[in-house]
Amino acid sequence: MKTRGQNNEIRFRVIAYNAARIANLAYSLVRGFLQSRERPQLKYPLNTD
């Protein structure tokens, strides 16, 4: 039953890795979209970081 545990572990690692990549990509897209929307409207840029 050792191989089954290893397969579950590998599957979990792949899912976690893909989830992290998707979250990172989505965050980058949303942040870029918000920045591109806000840039023309802001007269006085403020650091919100």
Image (spheres, grey):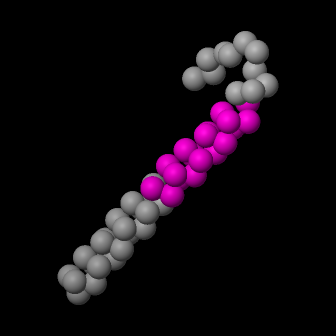
In the image: residue 7, left or right of residue 45: left
Q: Observer-nearest residue: 3 or 44?
A: 44
Left-right relation of 9 to 28: left
Magenta part of the protein: which range?
Answer: 21-38
Give yes or no for residue 40 being in the magenta stretch.
no
Where residue 13 appears, as percent x and y from the top left, is 34, 65
In which quadrant of the rendered image does the N terminus lie? Answer: bottom left
Above or below, comparing residue 15 to residue 35 in the picture: below
Q: Residue at x 57, y 23 (%)?
A: 49
**Residue 32 versus residue 9: which sits nearer the camera?**
32
Specify the principal SS of the magenta part: helix
Where in the figure is residue 42, as x and y percent of width and height?
Answer: 75, 21
The residue positioned farthest toward the top in the image shown: 44
Of all residues shown, which one is farthest toward the left? Answer: 2
Outermost residue toward the right in this view: 41
Residue 35 shown in magenta: yes
Point 36% across, 74% down: residue: 11
